[in-house]
Amino acid sequence: MQWVLGIDTSNYTTSLAAVEWTEGRRVVQARSILPVPHGERGLRQSEALFFHVQRLPGLFDQLYAQLVTHDAHVVWRGIGVSVRPRPSCRSYMPVFSAGWSLASSLARTLGVPVLPVSHQENHLSAAEFALLRMASVETAGQESLFPLGAPFIGIHLSGGTSDVVLAQSTRFGYRIDPVGEGMDLHAGQFVDRVGVAIGLPFPAGPHLERLAEQADEALALPSRVVQGKMSFSGPCSAALRALADGAAPASVAKGVQVCIANSVVKAVMYAYARCPDAAGVLIAGGVAGNRAIQGRVLHRLRIQAPRLAIRFAPPEYARDNAVGCAHLARRFLSGTRPDS
């Protein structure tokens, strides 16, 4: 059986994925969250890079073991790999060199092409891949949720980004027009800093979501968005002060979610005003998998922009993964138009 390999080495997860070549619907994954000591809020780039190098061989063994259950004869057609955070020549993080090193070496050894993409494009692509698989009947044969050349609003919420963009699908990935980047603290950092202060493990997202379910009321936190740029440093400081003053952790956790959701709504409306013919909104990244945030965003945008289709990456494809890299590489190498 023929496959396309995807590799993503982000700040906190080593990810591999394989997408089946012929129809592009079957996927196999192997990934590992990097270890962060309890009470810490992240890793230095040098530490994360070291862990990626350690984990990639074992993860590739895991991936290959799953592939041979489908067919003992595995054939690779190409590789997609994240090489930078955003699709800009000025965007750089050392952690992505681990994935690029493996991808370029494998490509030369196997004699297959490699497509370098950004981590942001990987997240958008993984969301599209998952949503297309879920709506298999009405989207049969499509490679993108949005027609070629049709702009859509993309929101990327993670530990390293709170980006609002206007995106268009291309054969090579996405044409990205930045609308607003995080002004200071990003959404995922907001979640993790408050979560660690509460005593939750890092990364704190899933734990904070479960804790928030226990709250009757949310702590009121300010929501600040300036020209599509989200700011979470003020809300984070307010949440940490509330915890120090004895506020209920569950109430604070719920307040964090409400604050992020309100900020996303404001950012979407700003982008929508700039591009009223947008084909829809696609919200991706680890924070986008939070069900409470999704529910509030959908509720408020149905009132404020009822004609705007809002789509979230499913939780499995919202967190860091390499499916988007493989999907983009397959689309590029097969010559498939995104709107076909």
Image (cartoon, helix red, strand yellow):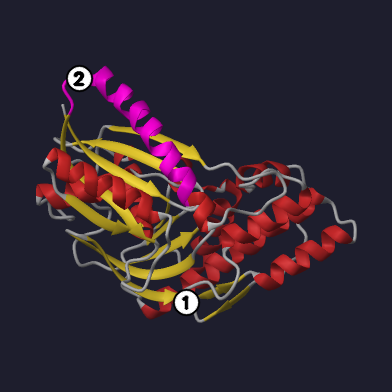
**Does any portion of residue 217 appear in the rendered image?**
no
Decide: is 142 above or below 147. above
Distance CA(mark 2)–CA(mark 1): 49 Å
Q: Is residue 65 magenta?
A: yes
Q: Is residue 328 magenta?
A: no
For the point 50% across and 55% down, which residue is it? 46
- Judged left or right of residue 243, residue 285 is left
Amino acid at the residue labelled 2: Asp
Amino acid at the residue labelled 1: Tyr
Label disc, if present, on residue 323 of the rendered structure: none
For the point 16% across and 40% down, which residue is it? 109
Q: Dot 2 lies on which element?
A: loop
- Judged left or right of residue 12, residue 15 is left
Q: Position of residue 259 (x, y in %)?
A: 65, 63
Q: How many marks?
A: 2
* Highlighted range, magenta: 49-74
User: For this rendering, which residue is in front, 332 or 11?
Assistant: 11
Q: Dot 1 lies on which element?
A: helix
Q: Position of residue 214 (x, y in %)?
A: 76, 42
Label disc, if present, on residue 270 of the rendered structure: 1
For the point 33% across and 54% down, which residue is it? 82
Decide: is 152 above or below 333. below
Image quadrant holding the N terminus, namely: top left
Marked residue nearer the N-terminal end (2 or 1): 2
Residue carrying label 2: 71
- The secondary structure that dominates the magenta segment is helix
- Judged left or right of residue 108, residue 310 is right
Decide: is 254 above or below 136. below
Q: Position of residue 298 (x, y in %)?
A: 52, 56
Decide: is 10 above or below 236. above
**Does any portion of residue 174 appear in the rendered image?**
yes
Answer with the quarter of the image where residue 29 lies: top left
